[in-house]
Amino acid sequence: AESAPWWTRAVVYQVYPRSFMDSDGDGIGDLGGILQRLDHLTDLGVDVLWLSPVYPSPQADNGYDISDYTDIDPLFGSLAQLDELIAALHARGMKLVMDLVVNHTSDAHPWFLESKSSKDSPKRDWYWWRPPRDGMAAGDPGAEPTNWQSFFSGPTWTLDEASGEYYLHLFDRRQPDLNWENPQVRHAVYEMMRWWLDRGVDGFRMDVINMISKAVGPAGELHDGPPIPGSALGSGYASFICGPRIHEFLQEMHREVFAGRSEALLTVGEMPGVTVEQARQFTDPARAEVDMVFQFEHVGLDHGTSKWEVHPLRMRDLKASFGRWQTGLADVGWNSLYWDNHDQPRAVSRFGDDSPQYRRDSATCLATLLHLHRGTPYVYQGQELGMANYPFTSLEEFADVESLNHHVHAVSAGHDPAEVLAALRTSSRDNARTPVQWDASPNAGFTTGRPWLAVNPDHVEWNAAAQREDQTSVFAHYRRLIALRHDDPVVALGDFHLLVPEHDEVYAFTRSLAGSALLVVCNVSRTPHDLAALLPESVGAELVLGNLPEDDTAQLRPWEARVLRLP
Ligand code: ISL
């Protein structure tokens, strides 16, 4: 156990800077604000801060569209403040992981401006430029080089009128994809990464890193994907999710950037669509690629044909999915564990029960369930306070490019605007992006100005100031879960074994290591369950951590979670 990497015992806290804390009254969170709130992280006990992008950016996708990789956007502060943050975190025994967004840049990045300037530009080949489809004229409907649909609606190709060619963007048109086939691109990225590590950062969260390799033929051919039902477009997944050179690129990156210093670092690759088998390869230490990946299977279980059509999560599906990931990465590789991030609606509203009666209990129950799995847990800002989805009522309240693009496309395709709005309300990423609720004052202590996105009105009750004083709060429960991982090697490293896989309302498993074992039981429903009948081994076991006041009955109360030590 002593020889296991440090991040097997660590908990990561994600800061989405624009919504964390505003120090200068412009309504947008900033580095100064993070520096003011470091005690919150220390008190919670987290080990690593992952900072979403703070680089210069036109902010088309809130910083995931970068126009300069080696500076800080004045909106957020300065390089000097970033240095201050690194030093302050290190002084508190925490590490800083930066977001690395290198599948694409902003269309305002000098590389793209140069690439776009002419077909003969030395940087033309740094991005994916293609002529219209054979026999078609630039701008004709369907003349795009492939039929791929963008993650943010519409085609993945935008025409540049001046050259008559299209450029590729898997996301918004203001996020052109870099061409990783070009070694100059790769080496420019590696140089930038070394520059940040030399500055003191402790690793990277790599944005959609499994999309950097595209399936491209010897003459530059790209291929249409299967049509998407009800759309003129197709899915390009087979061409860009874990493409043919992905392992080669990550291994090269490791050699060029991390070699010799990887042990102190944390690298996590964000990988939509990754399978367990692929993740096992990505995270096999012997292959030297990344430490762990963010997989998406569990956050897709409640999706219909798209993320905009959701149904309630079936607990058996979650168990089967988590179970396969736990087993698949048991002897080789490592899991990351998350419910929430800046792209997902709030878990307490989505998988829990955010009614007044059960909000606290379901938030702490879901937290216990996740944190007791084997893997590195990630806490997204506000999750530790039980922050919930926002009560959106009109389109004007949304800011997210994905939501706004979806609305335009869905309405122009003939969908009922009221239904599109209802889908945004449930599934929009803006649910996760409302400002952190520090206290009960008018802007929740987030800003003295006008917040860029509305503060949730529930902040008068749900806020950090109230919870820090309260030993029964969501915050206090997270603190105990994090301490437990630090203190108990069974939590960090124990083998996982799923129990009662078919049960719809009780999620149970054991963790065991060197003769020591924990039993974790979570009632993910409003119905009480007879624990002794369901899991007789629980009778008489010592309670290590629970989310409700201790009682000696064998009734598992609504949304109750217990961590028990087996004799
Ligand atoms: O958010 C999603 C689903 O609603 C995903 O499709 C998301 O776009 C995908 O997980 C990739 O996310 C990352 O890259 C995007 C950026 O918008 C996200 O914020 C980021 O986490 C493009 O850089």
Image (spheres, rainbow, N blue to C red):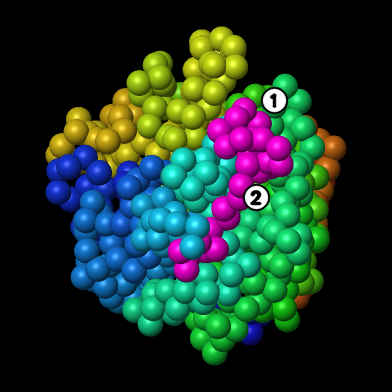
Location of residue 164 in the rendering, given as x and y in whole percent from the top left corner: 52, 44
Q: Quadrant of the C terminus?
A: bottom right
The disc, 2 or 1, on the residue closer to the chain's N-terminal end is: 1
Residue 525 appears in the picture as rendered = no
Quickly name the residue at label 2.
Answer: 272
What amino acid type should be assigned to the residue bearing mark 2? Pro
Location of residue 60 in the rendering, given as x and y in whole percent from the top left corner: 38, 42
Q: Quadrant of the N terminus?
A: bottom right
Q: Which residues are magenta?
A: 121-148
Q: Is residue 138 magenta?
A: yes
Quickly name the residue at label 1.
Answer: 231
Task: Name the chief secondary structure element in magenta.
Answer: loop
Query: Within the image, what quadrant is residue 332 found in?
Result: bottom right
Neighbor class of circle 1 (other Cα within 10 Å; few <14, some 14-19, many 20+) is: few
Question: Horizontally, is 391 left or right of 158 in the view?
Answer: left
Q: Under 8 Å from ligand 1: the CB of mark 2?
A: yes
Location of residue 243 in the rendering, given as x and y in whole percent from the top left corner: 72, 59
